[in-house]
Image (tube, helix red, strand yellow):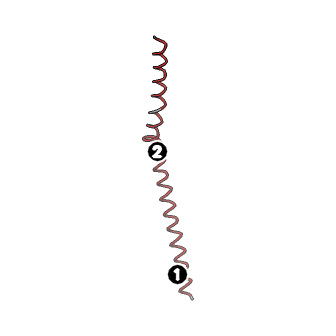
């Protein structure tokens, strides 16, 4: 009887170590910084894209006005 209970306990421990740890890491530890970093990158890309669009439109408008 002690052997199957030991095996079960080891299985339980390994399952506990395998399943909640990555989940906790991804939900609280890993995804939040990644998400904020991705958001920062997205904001930077959007702002630079908007700036480039504004610059291009400004140049086009100036060239159109010259003509």
Image coords of residue 65 (percent x, y): 53, 86
Q: Residue 64, relative to residue 34: is it above or below?
A: below
Image coords of residue 43 (percent x, y): 47, 59
Image coords of residue 26 (percent x, y): 46, 40
Image coords of residue 22 (percent x, y): 48, 36
Q: CA distance from mark 1 to mark 2?
A: 43 Å
In the rendered image, the quadrant that contains the N terminus is top left
Contact? badges 1 and 2 (CB < 8 Å): no
Badge count:
2
Given residues 67 and 26, the one toward you in this image is 26
Q: Which residue is mark 2?
A: 31
Q: Earlier in the sequence, mark 1 or mark 2?
A: 2
Tell me what residue is drawn at x 44 percent, y 46 percent.
32
The residue tagged with tag 2: helix, strand or loop? Answer: helix
Given residues 46 and 21, the one toward you in this image is 21
Does residue 53 appear to the left or right of 20 in the view shown? right
In the rendered image, the quadrant that contains the C terminus is bottom right
- Point out the residue furthest to the top here: 1
Tell me what residue is drawn at x 42 percent, y 41 percent.
28
Q: Residue 32, relative to residue 50: is it above or below?
A: above
Tell me what residue is drawn at x 49 percent, y 47 percent.
34
The residue tagged with tag 1: helix, strand or loop? Answer: helix
Q: Which residue is mark 1?
A: 61
Given residues 29 and 51, the one toward you in this image is 29
- Point out the residue furthest to the bottom here: 67
Q: Residue 29, relative to residue 55: is it above or below?
A: above
Q: Residues within 10 Å of mark 2 (few under 14, many from 20)?
A: some
Q: Nearer the viewer, mark 1 or mark 2?
A: 2
Tell me what residue is drawn at x 52 percent, y 77 percent.
58
């Amino acid at each position: 009887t002690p052997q199957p209970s030991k095996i079960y306990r080891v299985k339980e421990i390994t399952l506990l170590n395998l399943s909640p740890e990555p989940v906790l890491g991804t939900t609280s530890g890993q995804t939040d910084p990644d998400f904020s970093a991705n958001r920062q990158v997205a904001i930077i890309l959007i702002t630079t894209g908007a700036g480039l669009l504004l610059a291009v439109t400004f140049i086009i408008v100036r060239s159109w006005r010259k003509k």
